[in-house]
Image (cartoon, helix red, strand yellow):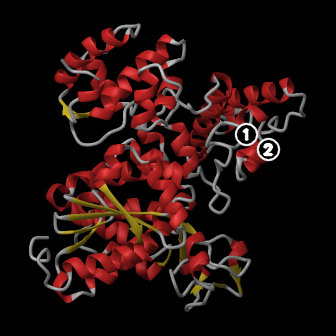
Amino acid sequence: MTSLQNLPERATAEEAAALLGPLAAGLGLPGEVPDVRTLRLWRTKRHLTLSGRNFTRRNLLEVLALLKLRGDGLTLQNAVTRVLALDDDRLHLLLVGGTAPLVRTDAEPVITLHLLAKGILEQHRLVGKGAIVGHTDAKKTGIENTPLSLHQAMARLGRHYFQEGQEDRAASVHVLLRLCTTPLKEWAPRALAELHEDGNAILVDPVYRVPSEDCGTIAQRADGTHLGDLIENHLHDELRATLKKLEDDADAAYTVIREFIGRHPMASAQELMVLNANPELSLDAVQFVQGLYQPVHAGHVKNGLVRRCAHCQGLIGEDGLCTLAGCRDDHPTEDSTPLKVDQAYVARPEVLMYWADPAREELRLYDRLQGVRALKGRVHLYPHSDRCDVSIGEEVGVDVKDYRDPVRLAQRLNRGLGGLGQYPERILAIADRRWSPTYRDRLVEQFSADNKRMVRVMSVSDAISHLKKTYGKGGSRAGTA
């Protein structure tokens, strides 16, 4: 008879549904055990961690824990938040009646935070369609200017402040969005500021002024948020949809576009013309890329010229520093040949944050491996339309991550490895500017049991050394990659 001690490592949806009934009954868990359709729905909505196509041992524990917490009166979404924050041992302890140190998820502040993160994402999307932040007359733009979720979050924040005897700091949407460029613990009501692991969350990136990675991760927990609502996913989906008509040539075109953006945070008109003439790109693809760039703001222009960074080819701002945050951290700013203002086009802020800035380390990894003779023709950038960032054949997949918060990164990866999980060897390469033994330890500590087993974590520089040594010198594994 199956028990918590001998759960299978993998199970189909049908096998999982058959196992869960007797297990729930034996544990005395209330509520209806999810059927096959519900289990698949929970996976789709990321209520369970994803690892491969089948349900894992951890998934079975997660479902049982959700049943228990639902029986304790929690909403499904709050139960999901708690369960995904626990490792396997804590899940087991929770189910057998022990005391597991759960994440604080008091319903009211958690709901407020979810609404705030979701509202910021929706506000960014609406601004892209012409909305005016804080404007009350929808007739002026023809669309909703401030999303309902952001209105609701502001009202709830005001109530939290009132209950705590504090002045309402969130009554103005403009002030609120500015506050969101700093950690929650510095401005939010105590009910939110003291939420476990969320107090340091910054919801609006202070450099690019777009919803941050923290915002996206928190919004994923909210009811009604879809993966397509997240900015990075939305960019990927738009590009894939644009290239869909190219069929077998779509993968190559995807790489051409992503590589161009990575190497050209700011592009000259001539560089864009060269890209437009690329025979691998369709007219739709060319128009998509053109839509990612915009003329440089007049504030960055001096004597009709725009300064350009020698390291990343990005825009040098009014403060004399490169506008790519990662480049600033990695290098002293140095000038390349400036561009004439009427010839200079800079990528939109969200493109800079989610594609151009991370691409610096992705391209460094790719270029260094491409320089190894034994790896020529075997190293691929954004293979299979971004299954991972860099691969060696079909043997090794590498994802490069530049997250400020390792805990937040672990939470995201625990929801699923995406295309990286399809490679026999999986490497998570952390940008050198983030890397430290403490960062690695915190990241791995928060990993699910499956990710601890499946993923190797190292810095980008260490990944370069490892891959060159293992696959680039004619060693035993070099011919199999």
- x and y percentages locating residue 174 in the rendered image: 77, 45
Q: Amino acid at mark 1?
A: Ala
Please state if 64 lies on the left or on the right of 222 as rendered: left
Q: Position of residue 165 (x, y in %)?
A: 90, 28
Left or right: residue 479 compared with residue 412: left
Along the line of sight, the residue nearer the viewer: 453 or 6? 6
- Can you say whether 291 is above or below 295 in the image? above
Where residue 73 sits in the image (x, y, percent)? Answer: 54, 12
Seen from the viewer's position, the closer of residues 16 and 160 is: 16
* Circle 2 residue: 187
Residue located at (30% from left, 25% from top): 4
Comes first in the chain, label 2 or label 1: 2
Q: Amino acid at mark 2?
A: Trp
Picture quadrant where residue 399 is located = bottom left
**Quarter of the figure with residue 391:** bottom left
Q: Is residue 92 above or below residue 261?
A: above
Q: Residue at x 9, y 76 (%)?
A: 479
Vertical position of residue 245 compared to residue 49: above or below? below
Where residue 386 appears, as percent x and y from the top left, is 30, 58
Name the residue carrying label 1. Answer: 193
Q: Is residue 22 left or right of residue 346?
A: left
Quadrant housing residue 42 = top left
- Mark 2 touching mark 1, by CB under 8 A? yes
Quarter placement of the C terminus? bottom left
Taking the image as shown, residue 91 lies to the left or right of residue 473, namely right
> Is there any visible trace of residue 395 in the rendered image?
yes
